[in-house]
Image (cartoon, rainbow, N blue to C red):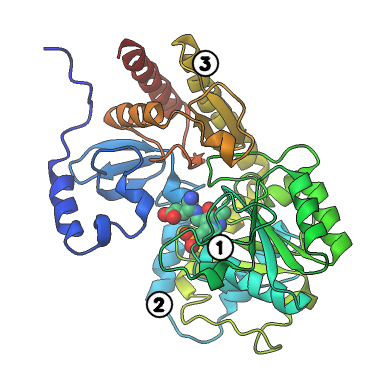
Amino acid sequence: MTQPRSSTRPLAVSRELQRRAEGLLPGGVDSPVRAFRAVGGDPPFVVRAEGASLWDADGNRYIDYFGSWGPMILGHAEPHIVAAVQQAAARGTSFGASTPEEAELASLVQRAFPSIEMLRFVNSGTEATMSAIRLARAFTGRNLFIKFEGCYHGHADALLVKAGSGVATLGIPGSAGVPAAATQHTLALPFNDIAAVEAAFARFPEQIACIIVEPIVGNAGCILPAPGYLEALRRITQRDGALLIFDEVMTGFRVALGGAQQLYRITPDMTCLGKILGGGLPCGAFGGRADILQMLAPLGPVYQAGTLSGNPLAMAAGIAAIRQLLERQSEIYPQLEQVARQVVQGVAELAADAGIPISVNRSGAMWTWFFQADPVTDFDSAARSDTAAFASFHRSMLDQGVWLPPSQFEAAFLSTAHGPAEVEQTLAAAKRAFAETARA
Ligand code: KE4
């Protein structure tokens, strides 16, 4: 009998847990991508994580390359963050009143993002982006806004538009339960296409409140802005009196301490943050120019609120995380760049050796291996990837203890806890996975 492909034990306990979860949670999950529908098979149930590793309910260990979808840049169960949360919890878990830690974390954010003069904490990236758009509409007195195909900004109704709506037509709902009225002011344009943006502003002069953009896209897989693209968005919005919102929920503190706006030297009017900001606890934020933020209640007419906004545990975790990134930035970001280059290029070279076409997009420790030969520069080109080949690669890697994000259209991440041992195991697993694919 040939050597079983899997080096992990059968997922008996995970499957039992899946059955129980499916009776209580739609699809057994609290967020769709976790259900592994894009790659097939049953998802392992995680019971513990530390550093670069996850353990499932059957005792299998995995190298983690999705990092809770971005937050875990310092690795799992990072001691400073764990201690900070434990100490905060012992002082009470939520007050619904002001605490010293909210301004402390806000001041740390401001050191990393000088464009953020003021901010407000919320509990998710979704809340951050939907609130930023509301602010932009109030500040400009306009209703229309632009987003880009393949960019995901959370699941607020106005942001769930079908791709391909194009410049002339306004948003078409991209989800059941979203009324046409909710997306009628949304323009969904192709990413990296300045002509489409110019045409939209020509069609709706002084009617567009804002552009919201993932400055480096993570939600179509990783897609980098074309040279001059972000500068053009900045120029066009400034010219028309629209606001530029950078959704840095994923890229913030990830691609650089100050996110994509630091890398590309662009100053947006507002920035949305999440993920790493909360050190793994539920936390988001939206911020930017003080003259815009001061329109928020209780100062101004824009209502926004949240029971657990600025929660003491999330603030404690965020302060512990962001303080480390600030204090150790000269060590952390070069290290992430070095390890990510070894992993990402190493796998791409192994694919090439096996005659398997892979197109790589990477910014620091955020990347995607697209299973196709051509460059991926927008959603349409990403969509031409061989998703079956990706699914096969994902399953083989998972069986060998390497857990990649379970979708071709998601970014992968690594942390400061990933080192030579993880690189070696990942490349060995990829070599076997590609050999299997070549044999199939
Ligand atoms: P949350 O509401 O999930 O905290 O954030 C929404 C959001 C906003 N903006 C960007 C750029 C994001 O990437 C996200 C959320 N990212 C996904 C990963 N593709 C979260 C994973 C999931 O939905 O389970």
Residue position marked by numbered label 3 in the rendering = 349
The residue where tag 1 is placed is 159
Q: Could you tell which of marks 3 and 2 lies nearer the N-terminus?
A: 2
Q: Position of residue 375 (x, y in %)?
A: 62, 27
Quadrant location of residue 362? Answer: top right
Q: Indicate the secondary structure of the residue bearing disc 3.
A: helix
Q: What amino acid type is highlighted by mark number 1?
A: Leu
Regarding mark 2 in the picture, which secondary structure is present there? Answer: loop
Q: Nearer the viewer, mark 3 or mark 2?
A: 3
CB contact under 8 Å: marks 3 and 2? no
Answer few, some or many: residues within 10 Å of disc 2's Cα (few below 14, many 20 plus, some between 14 and 19). Answer: some
Q: Badge 3: few (under 14), some or many (20 or more) residues near its Cα, within 10 Å?
A: some
Q: Is residue 388 above or below residue 99?
A: above
Looking at the rendered image, the quarter that the C terminus falls into is top left
Amino acid under disc 2: Thr
Q: Is mark 1 within 8 Å of ligand 1?
A: no
- In the rendered structure, the answer to whether residue 126 lies left or right of residue 77 reads right
Mark 1 and mark 3 in contact? Answer it, CB < 8 Å: no
Q: Which residue is mark 2?
A: 93
Task: Mark 1 vs mark 3: give the one in front.
Answer: 1
The Cα atoms of the two marked residues, 1 and 3, are separated by 38 Å
The reply, left or right, for residue 228 in relation to residue 150 is: right
The N terminus appears in which quarter of the rendering? Answer: top left
Instruction: Kindly identify the amino acid type of the residue bearing the numbered disc 3.
Output: Glu
Mark 1 / mark 3, whichever is N-terminal: 1
Q: Report how far apart the C-alphas of labels 2 and 1 lie in the structure.
A: 32 Å
